[in-house]
Image (spheres, helix red, strand yellow):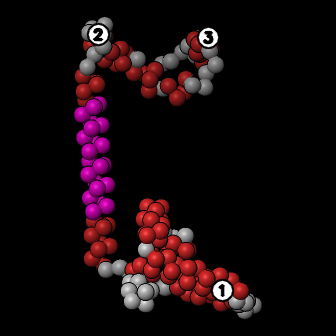
Amino acid sequence: MASENPLTEEERTELVAYLDGELPKAAVRTLEARLTTDPRMRSEMETLRKTWELLDHLPKPEPSPDFASRTLDRVSTIRATPIRIKAGSVSHRWKLWGASWAAAVILALVIGYEGGHFFSSRTAPGDQGRSKDVQPQLVEDFRVIENQRLYAHVDDLDFLRALQDPELFGEDN
């Protein structure tokens, strides 16, 4: 009876995958259900299982001593060959990448400029009069601000006041 309706190639491939443990769980359940109801499948499965067991009794071939070095040589030559890509696709990719970066930089500049303008024009709730007084204070202290790098080396204020004494250096003409 088994010779009357042979299994299809797909069914045989499914049985081999089952024996190898490569079948997904859902397909395993379906196949096991078919094995319980279909004597053709069960017979073929037993034949394949016995064949697999016979393969275990065959002598295992030993690789040659230079197998590893030959394999690594072949792999290195495969990796050394450059991958050829169409010139148009690479230049298109670079143009797209460059345009993206340019857009990001322009967006950052606009946001920075507008944000700085927005926050500099705003005053805190209690600072309505303070922003008007800052400008004259900066003008008044301009010499100090301009020479701040020189004042950084002075240890205390008394030393600076002592430098103003006319007897130390003489009168300015």
Number of numbered discs visible in the structure rendering? 3
Q: Is residue 118 above or below residue 25?
A: above
Q: Nearer the viewer, mark 3 or mark 2?
A: 2
Q: Is residue 164 magenta?
A: no
* Residue 54 marker: 1
Residue 68 in sight in this render: no
Q: Is residue 106 magenta?
A: yes
Please tell me how crowded label 2 is: few (under 14), some (14-19), or many (20+) other residues with Cα within 10 Å: few
Percent across and percent down for residue 72 are 63, 84
- Give, as a three-letter code, the residue at label 3: Asp
Q: Pointer 2: what residue?
A: 125
Residue 122 in sight in this render: yes
Q: Pointer 3: what residue?
A: 158
Q: Distance of mark 3 from mark 2, alpha carbons?
A: 39 Å
Q: Which stretch is magenta? A: 96-116
Q: Distance of mark 1 from mark 2, alpha carbons?
A: 91 Å
Residue 80 is left or right of residue 103, and the answer is right
Asked if the residues shown at circle 1 and circle 2 are in contact, with their CB atoms under 8 angstroms apart, the answer is no
